[in-house]
Amino acid sequence: MLVVMQATASPADVQRVCDAISEMGYQPLPMPGAQLTTVGLIGNDRRVDGSHIEALPGVAEIIYVSSPYKQVSREWRPANTLVTIAPGVTFGGSDVPVIAGPCSVESEQQIIEAAHTVRAAGAVALRGGAFKPRSSPYSFQGMGKEGLELLRRAKAETGLAIVTEAMDDEGAQLVAEYADCIQIGARNMQNYSLLKTVGKLRTPVMLKRGMAATVQELLLSAEYILAEGNDQVILCERGVRTWDPSSRNMFDLNAIPAVKKASHLPMIADPSHGTGVRDRVGPMARAAVAAGADGLLIEVHPDPNRALSDGAQSLFPQQFTELMGELVPIAAAIGRRITTPGAR
Ligand code: PEP
Ligand code: MN
């Protein structure tokens, strides 16, 4: 439930509403805005009768949020939330930042070379997993902390922001020391303990859609993070399970406008995992920008044929450079701009 205050409401009026919500056993969340203040009532508000709050001085109206997710919804916050992961790298505004890099951090040479390559092509953030959630326990599991150290070195050399995955609660604390944005992977979208942990941190989070999750389940998972106090959440479409063996996953382009209508959070697209097939990454990246994606996540490897994970969907450096050039006029056609790296 949201209590909308009148523009003329005094701080004492707002406080009175907060006190009334606390007395009802719920947590008040005052949100001062440019024109007026709203006060959220946090908790399962299905049976709350707000009539006596509506009668308090300074109250304009009460809005009952109809969706099962509350703080994530556009009803709760009509304006887009901007998520800034590093200076000049903001998701949710008119800019479209591109995050690129290999699936996994594999060696110092590999990640440093990848960082220089993607930066030269126009990416503003470097991705690369140090902790890898692999379908097989016998596949490469990532370099762990050493991989995080290498990402830090790549950042120092190139200035790129770092996006990397945390797989569990202890890992999240560690990853937060190195990352500008913590990735929660598809396999962990419904790991509620991990979602609560990153909700308590103050590092931005990129939450990927589970491989068989509905859009509503994605938004409810994001609600876990916001409910703990972290509203710096970027959502990511990365394809869903398909019966069709012609692609690894089915990239759900339609989730982009669906999420953006339902939520104020930025929604980016990962056409690499979304297709799993290198030649389809470019077309789906272009389509995602045209569909209104607030950013892209693209796997690029200096030598995809030797990649320790996801080589088949990783772009060759030259392909990525060409793609970045193609994205510029597509973004411009809908009044947006592919974020350019700052001078360095
Ligand atoms: C990844 O980004 O490399 C990854 C493992 O992604 P997902 O969780 O979407 O499979
Ligand atoms: Mn990958």
Image: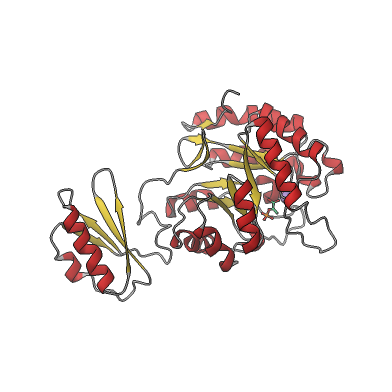
Q: Position of residue 340 (x, y in %)?
A: 57, 28
Closer to the camera in the image, 195 or 242 = 195
Closer to the camera in the image, 98 or 329 = 98
* Above or below 262: residue 158: above
Query: Which quadrant of the rendered structure holds the C terminus?
Result: top right
Closer to the camera in the image, 272 or 192 = 192
Query: How is the model colour-coded?
Result: secondary structure
Closer to the camera in the image, 10 or 133 = 10
Q: Residue furthest top?
A: 343
251 left or right, relative to 204: right
Query: Which quadrant of the rendered structure holds the N terminus?
Result: bottom left
* Above or below 314: residue 185: below
| Residue at screen point 16% across, 52% down | 10
Question: Would you say residue 90 is visible in this rendering?
Answer: yes
* Above or below 66: residue 140: above
Q: Position of residue 197 (x, y in %)?
A: 55, 62
72 left or right, relative to 126: left
Total number of numbered labels? 0
* Above or below 65: residue 113: above
Q: Residue furthest bottom?
A: 47
Q: Quadrant of residue 119?
A: top right
Question: Would you say residue 238 is visible in this rendering?
Answer: no
Q: Position of residue 85 (x, y in %)?
A: 53, 42
Q: Position of residue 241 (x, y in %)?
A: 68, 60
